[in-house]
Image (spheres, helix red, strand yellow):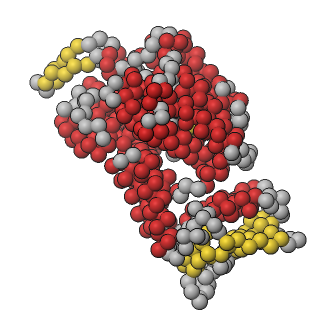
Amino acid sequence: MVSGFLVFLLALPLCLGIAMASGFPPVAGILTAVVGGLLSSWLGSAALTIKGPAAGLIVIALGAVTELGGGDAVLGYRRALATIVVAACFQVLFAVLRAGRLGDLFPSSVVHGMLAAIGVTICAKQAHVLLGVSPVARAPLGLLAEIPSSVARLNPEIALIGALGLVLLFGHASLAKRVAWLRRVPAPLLVLAVAVPLGLMFDLEHSHTFTFSRTLFTVGPSHLVNLPDNLLTAVTFPDFSRVLSPTGLKYVAMFALVGSVESLLTVKAVDLMDPLKRRSDLDRDLFATGLGNLVAGLLGGLPMISEVVRSTANLASGARSRGSNFFHGLFLLLFVAFAPGLIHRIPLAALAGMLIFTGVRLASPGELVKAYRVGAEQVLIFCVTMFVTLATDLLVGVASGIVLKTGIHLLNGASPRELFRPDIQEQVREDAVVLRVRGAAVFTNFLALKRQLARHVEAPCIEVDLTEARLVDHTVMQRLHELEEEHARQGRRFRVLGLGQHRGMSAHPLSARKKVPGGDLGLTP
């Protein structure tokens, strides 16, 4: 209950901000978190993850509202809900078909490039909200180019609220590393503690003008969160009239694929931090997410995933079971049902500051540095995915990254047949199971290797021999390392052998490896 309450304090402003940035009514984010807490918690959701709306889906949701509405925001919202409902059905189908393992298929450089593009897009859009200015552009690159113009035209009262919020968020992130007790104080709560009194001082609840530096500015309720007085009036039903159109199907695919992958990656990351070292059933969690999205979409909510920021905060608050996810949803429901007037006093600039902070973390230059340490080819894949996503959309961006990585593998000696059908020889000994991989061990054929590994889950020792593999990519190296850690936690041995004749693309221990003909590099296998 304590963990759930602390996560609720963090989730409340984030749910509102993500909903508004997605083109949805603010209450839609709350509806999703309530469903994720009260329903998904008992459907097989991973024990320590928090279900709710995520910044990573803002770009998709906003695109769905814009393209399906044709200029009508309300109609676009209802048609976007229809794509969420259909995508949720696919997520449930994925879970039934045990497709949770697809989380292993996507290369990390592509995923991080996609998230970086989402972060840039969030910052580009929310910067104008923080400054109190309405931009002309709509596309991410146009919004970025328009930021200097918005800075020159900023509304001083609104910008002050947003700027103070950013200072508090980045200051908290910096000081929390050195001050232990500060880690237990949600940074968004500090922002609200400053922003709400400032909004009252500036009388944002009433429309009026003021003069600053000989310029006239207008402020009013449009700069505050707008919520219905009754939660039941917020329920909105989907409009299925365009869901089978090419545009509708595109967003169904985006919600289903991107949402599933991002959620699965979060579950895997949280499992690594679980103090009890439990492993979540990815298919059950995907089933819980899919059913939660089905209900949320039918009621007017955003799509939900296992959200990484709130899940990490949940762990830090001492959570040990899925009860914290339930209580976080319950506290949100009670707050919105009985105190909507308090939410109405939150300035939009404060929410914009929180989203920009999230966007900066998604698009952190540190991710590019990490990619460079793994190998120059990872930087290329990361950048191509990011820039194509910014210039087009998420689906095209992710596809371009995957195609580029596949092309790099072909240039490095992998044959087209090996990309999808690995040559694996299996030897079962009394003391170990040995899998010898020939040809190429790359992200496109890793699921076949993992399926073969899954047949020997009870073996005391598993050895993966890569001596005859011409190419081993970074994704496979990373997944094998994760399996090694997982087996070690369970008291079993998992060894990767035969890399002594391979040259790494960089000095990073998990970089891609290419076999050097006729030579032993003298490396430790």
Q: In this view, does 418 lie above or below 328?
A: below
Residue that protrudes farthest toward the right in the picture: 430
Instruction: Residue 468: give x, y in percent of width and height.
Output: 65, 79
Q: Which residue is drawn at 48% across and 58% down?
A: 402
Q: Is residue 314 above or below residue 388?
A: above
Instruction: Residue 70: give x, y in percent of width and height.
Output: 33, 29
Q: In this view, does 484 lie above or below 428?
A: above
Q: Residue at x 44, y 30 (%)?
A: 242
Does any portion of residue 149 appear in the rendered image? Answer: yes
Picture quadrant of residue 451? bottom right
Instruction: Residue 189: give x, y in percent of width and height.
Output: 48, 28
Q: Quadrant of the N terminus?
A: top right
Q: In which quarter of the image is the C terminus?
A: bottom right
Residue that protrudes farthest toward the bottom in the picture: 518
Question: Residue 515 or 154: which is nearer the viewer?
Answer: 515
Question: Residue 406 or 201: which is nearer the viewer?
Answer: 406
The tally of labels here is 0
Q: Residue at x 47, y 32 (%)?
A: 243
Question: Residue 249 or 139: which is nearer the viewer?
Answer: 249
Q: Residue at x 48, y 21 (%)?
A: 27
Instruction: Residue 183: give x, y in percent of width and height.
Output: 55, 38
Q: Is residue 71 above or below residue 277?
A: above
Does any portion of residue 9 appear in the rendered image? Answer: no
Residue that protrudes farthest toward the left in the picture: 214
Horizontal side of residue 363 vs 230, given as left or right: left
